[in-house]
Structures are given as C-alpha cells and as structure tokens.
Image (spheres, grey):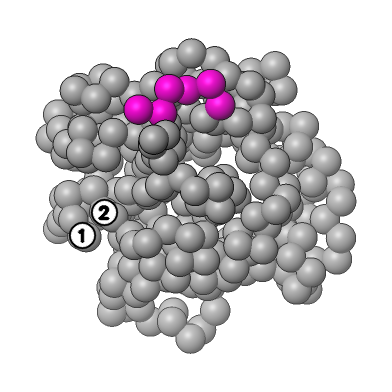
Amino acid sequence: MRARPRLLLVHAHPDDETLTTGGTIAHYVARGADVRVVTCTLGEEGEVIGERYAQLAVDHADQLGGYRILELTRALEALGVDEPRFLGGPGHWRDSGMAGTPPRGHPRFADADLTEAAGVLATVIDEFRPHVVVTYDPDGGYGHPDHIQAHRVTTAAVTAARWQVPRFFWTVSSTSAMTAGLRHLGEVPAGWTRITIDEVPFGFPDDRIDVVIDVGDSLGAKLAAMRAHATQISVAPDGRSFALSNGIAMPVLAEEHYLLVSGEPGPRHDLLAGLDLA
C-alpha cells in the first residue's frame, strides 16, 4: 500500500505558517497528505492589531503568547491540520522580537543553543519521517532573528536526523508574482498604505525558484486561517489583500513559491511528485 505523503513545515511564530505556506498546507491536506507544522515560539512580542486584545501585548499583561496558541489552533483547523506543535513544547523558547528588542528574562529563540534546538527538531523528524521539510531561506524571508534561527535550526536538524529527508525546501517570495499582485490589489481599506515592488526588500527572481504551487483551490482555507490570526493580520473585505500591524497592503497570491535546497528535483508544480513515498 502506498504511504501517505508526509510534509513537515517549521515556522517561527503563529501566523507565519499561514502567510507563506497556508495555501500549500491546505492544498496537500485536501489531497490526503499528513501535514504537520512545528512552531518555534508563541509570538509573544507581536504587535496587536485593534483594541480588543491590545492589553495582552508585551508592554501590558504580556499574555499574547497564550492567546496566539488559540489563534494558531483555529488557523490550522481551517487549513486541515489537527493541532499545533511547538518546538520543545509551548513556551520553551520565547519570541525574540525584531533586532534590538530587549530580553524579557526568558530564553529567546534567537539565542537558543543550536545543538539543543536542532536535536529537538531532529527527534521530530526521526519520529515523523517527512518526505518534505520546509522552512525559510538564510535571511529568514525578511530578516527577523527568529526566522533566521528557524532556518539555522532546521538546516542543522535535517543534517543531524537519522531519517534522510528526501526533499528540503525554503519557502520564498517571488518578485514577479509580488509585482503583479501589488499592481492588482483592488480596493484596500481606509488607512492602509499602498507600496510598489521597489519598496519590498525581499524576493527571488523566477530563475531561482524551483517549485510554484497553484493554491487557487485553497484560497478560501488560507483566508479563513488568516482571519483566525486576527491580532496579527487584517484581511480586506474582498479577500484580495491583507495588512499586518504596519498597515501596508499586500496581495493575497494564488501561488506559493519554493526553492529546493537538497534532494532530487521534481516537476515545477509539485513538492512531492517523483518521490518514493515509503
């Protein structure tokens, strides 16, 4: 009997799984894959959108991390994933915040011992035996310390694990897709800021990207998951754009993009095709 495909995605904070790979998660779950998401922190340092939960933030009650477990649980349910999984357990490492954020008296993920953190993740890999592992590029997508650390930890864990991961990918942004998306945002809510591609400090050219997943059939699930992360993400009424706490309007794309790090290349439209699903 052919085994179910197994995908493991490693993300830094609740909401990252949805923003960069949510369509892919829902796409493969709908096709019978066993998809698991490991989140490295609770996102305690996140800025809160709106007033309802503003006092949970770090400078008030410092209870945001606990609330974001609920948001992540709801988002994963929308994508078809059974439950959240946290590296080392919920709260083991704290969200580090952006560069320059002061320590809060609890071990930050950016400061985690690489051997320890990679060892914890290698155990997850050995138990789950994923056919595909996904995390960020060396710059963490946009330079966040926890994203960079997630890249380092995942890379080390893939190397250290006894299970030989057949394909290892980075989730990346496509400059051409982002350019087209920014040009066709449609109406955006009052107060949001429109930008051009020249103001986006990250992205890869098409000739660097190995796999493009068409997630058009999963956009409904992705949008539901984005709305579940309401303290972090605002979604435009028409579902064509979203904004984080900075209020910058960004497109909701019908494609998600990946760069192959290791393993035999497959077709451009599928992370799994051609693999021996043992």
Residue drawn at x 74%, y 40% as measured from the top left: 178
- Whether the residues at callouts 2 and 1 have beta carbons within 8 Å, the answer is yes
| Residue 277 painted magenta | yes
Quadrant of image for the C terminus: top left
Q: Which residue is mark 2?
A: 86
| Residue in the picture at 33% in, 51% down | 39
- Furthest-top residue in this view: 264
Q: Position of residue 150 (x, y in %)?
A: 34, 37
Instruction: Choose between 86 and 48: the one closer to the eye.
Output: 86
> Is 107 rendered above or below residue 175?
below
In x, y percent, where is residue 268? 66, 24
In this rendering, is residue 221 above or below 51?
above
- What kind of residue is marked 2? Phe
Q: Nearer the viewer, residue 178 or 166?
A: 166
Q: Secondary structure at mark 2?
A: strand
Q: Secondary structure at mark 1?
A: loop
For disc 2, the neighbor class at 10 Å (few under 14, some 14 to 19, many from 20) is many
Q: Quadrant of the N terminus?
A: top left
Nearer-the-camera pick, 186 or 124: 124
Residue behind mark 1: 91
**Amino acid type, residue under disc 1 in the picture:** Gly
Q: Nearer the viewer, residue 258 or 215?
A: 215
Q: With 180 as the anchor, is 211 left or right in this view?
A: left
Is residue 128 part of the magenta span, yes or no? no
Magenta segment boundaries in residue numbering? 273-278
x, y percent for residue 128:
27, 40
In percent of width and height, residue 219 lies at: 68, 57
